[in-house]
Structures are given as structure tokens and as C-alpha cells.
Image: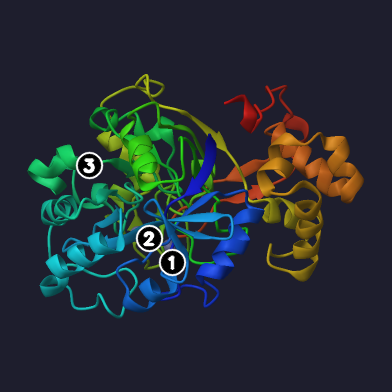
Amino acid sequence: MIVDADLHLHSRFSGATSPKMQMKVLAQESKKKGMHILGTGDCLHPQWIQEIKEGTPHDGLIEIGDTHFLLSTEVEDEHRVHHLLFFPSFSAIEQFRESIHKFTPNMDSDGRPTLHLNGADIALRAKEADALIGPAHAFTPWTAIYAYHDSLESCYGDMVKYLAFLELGLSADTTYADTIHELHRLSFLSNSDSHSPYPVRLAREFNRLQINDYSWDDIKKALLRQGGRKIILNIGLPPQKGKYNQTACIRCYSQYTLLDAETKKWKCPCGGRIKKGVKDRISELATLHSGQHPSHRPSYLYLLPLAEIISHAIGQSSPYTKTVQSRWNELITAFGNEVNVLLDRPIEDINRVTVPVIAEAIQSFREKKIKIYPGGGGKYGEIELPLGEQDQKQNTQKTVFDY
Ligand SMILES: [Zn+2]
Ligand SMILES: [Zn+2]
């Protein structure tokens, strides 16, 4: 069977997260995005574990309504590198907690704990607990493996062989990451890293998996590409939409070329620091020309959040306004979930449910006519619709069911 999974998010027990990050709310909201599987996030945190345990355990996953949760967490290592972990059971979580508790000051208070251990130490402890591990948002400039290391081995040492996946992060995609040869053997994950359950954030990136059952074993096999289980599609934002795509000042968001930033010694005239963008960092690390994918690599399909497209179409300042939400709701009520609206339903059907200007904006998205001003320095890329005169006759994007 084919299922959609967003495997990285945070509970309300992590910093800067919505108080609405509750298991029941996540189960409700994920359906509207068409997700079948979500990561729980933060599964080392005692109160969050209690809330997770209110769901029904089944084959290593937790069920609430129609949503299946994979036990997951993110941890920060001694170099501030973030790692994503998946666990097969509550007992595996308990074993891992015991193995790290001497090395963490905040496991009981912060959903994303800091560990005074390096990547290799954490991977070894993950292996002992039968957990899966891989680098989170691997290329972002603050808290990612390639912000501090030039290779996987530099971070994970001998444990590099145990890595199960690499998470691309919002500012990168498969085309970027496959220019680095050492990544070709790994499966890539595209996850939201969401801090709120709202449709603009939750499942803004996700993975389409081919599995036989909703179970830990099947998801593990899909990540490791075993027994016919696999990731068949990565789906997410165009990398330019991510907030660290370009090299830019973190105060005024002025963007720089790599050469320019080096000349200015990473200091913006405004006084702010210039941070290296994901695109430039990957070009430093690249060992291959783009377009050289390993044969197992699935396609990457670009999506933009529907609420954001609606807000631009009807001239609202933000995707969170009541007007946008009610327009979003009428489409989701009619067509079930966001993927159906954005990619799969005939535009005439959509036109019957919503106002013409929104249907036109969705059509523009399908025809790749939405322009993206790339993000950088912590500011998300901005969209503008439609592209207008430069309307090149590009091929329309394949529907999600073509994969
Ligand atoms: Zn992180
Ligand atoms: Zn500046």
C-alpha cells in the first residue's frame, strides 16, 4: 500500500512551539493534509510520552483515529548538530533514556534535549536501543551536520555505516543533495519539522512510502529499502522557499554571493552577521554535477502550502486570517485533503467550490507560474503569482498519482 508520512515535528514541550501541539489535535489536522503517518516528535520527554501512551499501540506504532504515529525525537549533540531518531517501542525509548541520562541536563524539561555526546556516541547508543538515526535538516547553517562537518564520517566516525537516512531540510531537495557522492547510499527524508499543527506548517514536506502494513518493521524496511518497501516520492517546498536557501544577513536579510560574504568577512553593513546559505554550502561540498542520482532515488515533487496560495490570491496579509482559513476549509471539506486540491482534482471542480481567483492561483501553481523570491538569513522565500508575461510554456507538473 501507498502511504504519506511526515516524520519530524515537535510537541508543545519543545521551545517556540504552539500549545496546540497535542496528540489529538495532530491526529485531526494530519488527516486534512492527507497524512497517514506522523512522527510523534519529542518522545524522550516524560509528559509527552504519557500523552503518546493514550493512543493505541499496534505493531510498534501508536494509533489515534486513522493516524499512525512513529515514536520519534530530535536531539542536539555537543557540537549543536541535530539528529533525528526513530524508536520501535516504549522499552527502546526507556533504554535510550537510561543510556544518555548522565549526559543531558534537560531531557525532562525540553522536548529536544541537548546531549553532551558526539554524533558517534549518540549513534552507538541508538543502535544499542534498536533505534534508527540520521542527520536532521542536514545543510542548515546553525544546527546541522554540514554546518560543522565536511563529511558524514567526521560526525559519526565508525558508526557512519549505521545511518538509516538523511533529512534534507526545507532549503534543500534531492537535486541539491545528490551532488554530494557520499549521500548516494542513503535514503532521503523530506519532513516538515513543524512547530504547529496548522496546515501551513504541518506536512509542508512529507514522504510517500510503499509498505505492506502499518508497522515499525515496514517503516524501517522502507527507510533501508528492504523487502520491496521503499520511499517512492519525496514531496516538499521548492528549496528557494526555505529560510536558509541563500547566503544572507540574519538581521536585515540582504542576500550575498559567497564571494561577497567572504570579502565582507561575514559582516553585513547593517551590523548583522551573514550566514552561509544551504545552496552555497552544498556547492562547496559538491563532488558531482547535478542530476546524477543513484538508481534508487525517488523523484522530488514540489508543493506550496494551499493556505499560502489562497492568501496571495485573495490579497490577505497572512495565511492565518479567518478569511483564508474559511476558504481553505471549504476546499478541504469538498476534496478531502490538500494534495487533492493542489495537484489532483480537475480545476473545473475546484472552480465550482471556491472563487475564480483562487482556482486561477491553483492553476498557476500547477503550471509552475508562481514566482519564488528565495529565502535566506532566517526569512522564508516569498511567492508571487502569477508569473505574468514571462509565461513560458513549461510542462505542467505531474500529478501525485503518476508516481
Ligand atoms: Zn533541528
Ligand atoms: Zn544586514
Horizontal and vertical percent position of residue 332: 75, 53
Check residue 251 in the rendering and tell me which mark sits there, or answer none.
Answer: 1
Say what secondary structure mark 2 lies in.
Answer: loop
The residue that disc 2 covers is 268
Q: Ligand 2: does it lie within 8 Å of the C-beta at label 1?
A: yes
The amino acid pointed to by label 2 is Cys
Identify whether 282 is placed above or below 169: above
Q: Quadrant of residue 200?
A: bottom right
Query: Which residue was labeled with disc 3?
Result: 163
Identity of the residue drawn at 56% across and 69% down: 24
Q: Nearer the viewer, residue 239 or 53?
A: 53
Q: Please state if 193 lies on the left or on the right of 324 as rendered.
A: left
Which disc, if any, is residue 130? none
Q: Residues within 10 Å of mark 1 (few under 14, many from 20)?
A: some
Q: Where's residue 155, x and y in %? A: 15, 48
Q: Amino acid at mark 1?
A: Arg
Q: CA distance from mark 2 to mark 3?
A: 38 Å
Q: Quadrant of residue 52?
A: bottom left
Up-down relation of residue 210 to residue 11 (above or below): above
Tag nearer the camera, 2 or 1: 1
Q: Is residue 61 above or below residue 385?
A: below
